[in-house]
Amino acid sequence: MTTMPKAFAQAAKRHGVPESILLAVSYMESRWDCNGGRPSTAAGFGPMHLTDGVAPSKSRHHHIDGDEDPRGDDSRPPLHPTEPAELQNGFPASLHTLERAAELTGESLERLRKDPAANIDGGAALLADYQQALGAPPSADPADWYGAVARYSGASAEEIAADFADMVYEVIHEGATRMTDTGVEVTLSPSPEVHPSRSWLTRLDLPHLARADAVECPDSICCEWIPALYRRLPEGKYGNHDIADRPTSQTIQYIVIHDTEELYDKTLKLVQDPSEMSWHYTLRSRDGHLAQHVLTKDVAWHAGNWYVNTKAIGLEHEGFLAAGGTWYTEAMYRTSARLVRYLADRFGVPLDRAHIIGHDNVPGLVPAKVEKMHEDPGPYWDWAHFFDLMGAPLRPDGDSGTATVMILPDYGRNRPHYIGCDEDHPEATCPPHGSASVWLHTEPREESPLVKDIGKHPAGESTFSVYDHAARAVTGQRYVVAERQGDWTAIWYLGQKAWFHNPGSDPVAVPSRTLIATPRPGLTSVPVYGRAYPEPAAYPADVEVQPLVPLQYTFPAGQSYTVGLTTTGEFYKATTFDTTLHRVVRGTQKYHQIQFGHRVMFVKSEDVVVTEA
């Protein structure tokens, strides 16, 4: 069997394509993963993402979701535009690169889908074909291939094609090394001397995509404005977001990472329906294209926790949790990282995992909401790579005796056992793939049970399902060490000791100094909350007091949890279409956000003592 590095070298030589171009295009499309012949969200296959134009069916795990206040209408009128028939998932339906690759190489469609070497050869043939069609020279200089690379994106606008091509050349400049899903390491050496000839882009004769004045994104990103609709609905309801004045009215503390569990075109239709929920941005998988829907000053309904919604910006990434590692593309990671860095700089949001959180890290607002909280983007989202791209790498801080650790496995080599990726066979083991999560056990041995989450599973046990994070810790999260035994480390997690395998030869956690919270002396336990609301005395007469309801967990004396941020109680009352009736209530009650389990939670400052680890 031809190895992947050899397949890239042979295909590049056979078709006269610079090997760095072939490697970089593949990295941007698939991160060099083969994906077992399974289609992407854009019906693409293999490391070169050859497309056949037949979109996969959507998952039944629908993760685009709102909060605890019902603000929609089940009638869901067709208020969004219908995508033109000639477009499919945002790309021309005629762009069936799998068929063209078969014509150019003589390979069968089946081999091009499932055989990595054939797929790579087909991608190289396409690039050579595009180069020739542009009238560009069959050059050995990667700089001359800008037009062919831009066309390979399949984009329907010049700016989107240019974004993709620019990211490909970024990879060529920087280089990359990665362990693929087949367990093979692929390397692209850096070539900072390559300066692409962008003049070839005009030969594609693509239309321009107008940049609306409303969009809030870096100048380096092609950003489209597709607004979420703000409308009255029957029976006094309205949707699908709230008008606000952030950060003047409330500070923005979080950026929440979601996946859509839907294809891109359907996702856009959902966000344009005022009877649905909303989020601020959507990112397309294939090329990382970005659309904004809600202004950052306004509150979108996306996190399932009203307190977090009012303090957060929500980003939806096209993809499916159970197949997330398969088609969370490099193009999408890079665009998202640029956007998050831009938003974090603009609003003063620290680039750490206490502020840049997944939907799966958002706490349930009250006990009854915990069980149904969502799990996206899931264990296949590569948090370490994401932070690297933001220029804020997750790194050790301390030594072997430091009392706190950060979860930081090697994503490509960390391949925990998961089930539930195949809906027809839910007990089947998921295909091997890198992961950002580690399993947590009740004892320091693999065969011991997983720790329990009484909120997620009130009457049952934690499972190995890819959708069940009840007994998982994930990259970037920091915990207090409870005990160490040989190659095992225990942390405090949801009021119990949770053990994970952490050998010195291949650690999945590193020392990381931070603040820790411990119950104040004299207290046997401390209540934890899913929101940081003001004390009752802070509410004016025309605003109903929001009760401070503890969650069902116990934070007992003798345990400690890391502190991610400190804040003062706030509540945004926004239950009507009339914005003059909206109120921001600010109190004096101080809270500390702690990493209590997989999700963050809050404790009152007077209940704990905060110290340096």
Image (cartoon, rainbow, N blue to C red):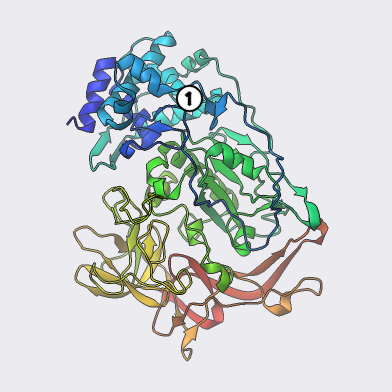
Q: Quadrant of residue 586?
A: bottom right
Residue drawn 82% across the image and 58% down it? 580
Residue 397 at least partly seen:
no
Residue 345, placed above or below residue 205: below
Q: Is residue 158 left or right of residue 535?
A: left
Q: Secondary structure at mark 1?
A: loop
Q: Mark 1: which amino acid? A: Gly
| Most foreground residue, 593 or 402 | 593
| Most foreground residue, 377 or 613 | 377
Return the residue found at the far top: 135
Residue 223 at least partly seen:
yes
Residue drawn 25% across the image and 67% down it? 400
Q: Give percent across and percent down for residue 480.
A: 37, 72
Residue 394, placed above or below residue 288: below
Looking at the rendered image, the quarter that the N terminus falls into is top left
Q: Is residue 374 left or right of residue 119?
A: right
Looking at the rendered image, the quarter that the C terminus falls into is bottom left
Q: Give percent across and percent down for residue 9.
A: 23, 24
Q: Give percent across and percent down for residue 224.
A: 61, 34
| Most foreground residue, 28 or 264 | 264
Q: Which residue is mark 1?
A: 154
Q: Give percent across and percent down for residue 252.
A: 61, 57
